[in-house]
Image (cartoon, helix red, strand yellow):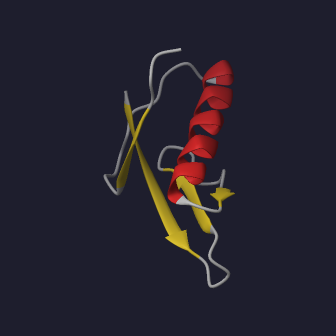
Amino acid sequence: MELQYTYWQEKDGWFLGYLNDYPSHWTQGKSIKELEEMLADLYELEQEEQPSITPERKIGLLTLSPA
């Protein structure tokens, strides 16, 4: 499964980002890999409350492995 996300790097080196379908839910990581792990966790939490999403924009791709 691939999810679209938007991210940027702050002056202090941290990466901030959000899933494009949840733009009000930002997360962060010290690296892109860590940011993607946090985004995957965010997606799983959102799926518990909202079972389906439809991507709108294409900025970056996050690949999740099956659980």
65 and 27: which is toward the camera? 65
34 and 6: which is toward the camera? 34
49 and 29: which is toward the camera? 29
Q: Is residue 59 left or right of residue 33?
A: left
Instruction: Determine the residue located farthest toward the top in the rendered image.
Output: 67
Residue that appears at 62% across and 76% down? 13
Q: Position of residue 17 (x, y in %)?
A: 56, 59
Above or below, 43 against 15 in this view is: above
Residue that appears at 48% across and 22% down? 52
Quadrant for residue 11, please give it. bottom right
Residue that appears at 39% across and 33% down? 54
Above or below, 13 against 55 in this view is: below
Instruction: Determine the residue located farthest toward the left in the rendered image.
Output: 58
Q: Position of residue 26 (x, y in %)?
A: 65, 56
Q: Is residue 19 left or right of residue 26?
A: left
Q: Position of residue 9 (x, y in %)?
A: 55, 74
Residue that appears at 57% across and 36% down? 40
Above or below, 55 against 47 in this view is: below
The quadrant of the rendering that contains the N terminus is top left
Q: Is residue 56 left or right of residue 23?
A: left
Instruction: Determine the residue located farthest toward the bottom in the rendered image.
Output: 11
How many dots with numbers?
A: 0
Above or below, 50 against 18 in this view is: above
Q: Is residue 5 left or right of residue 11?
A: left
Quadrant for residue 65, please give it. top left
Q: Position of residue 4 (x, y in %)?
A: 39, 46
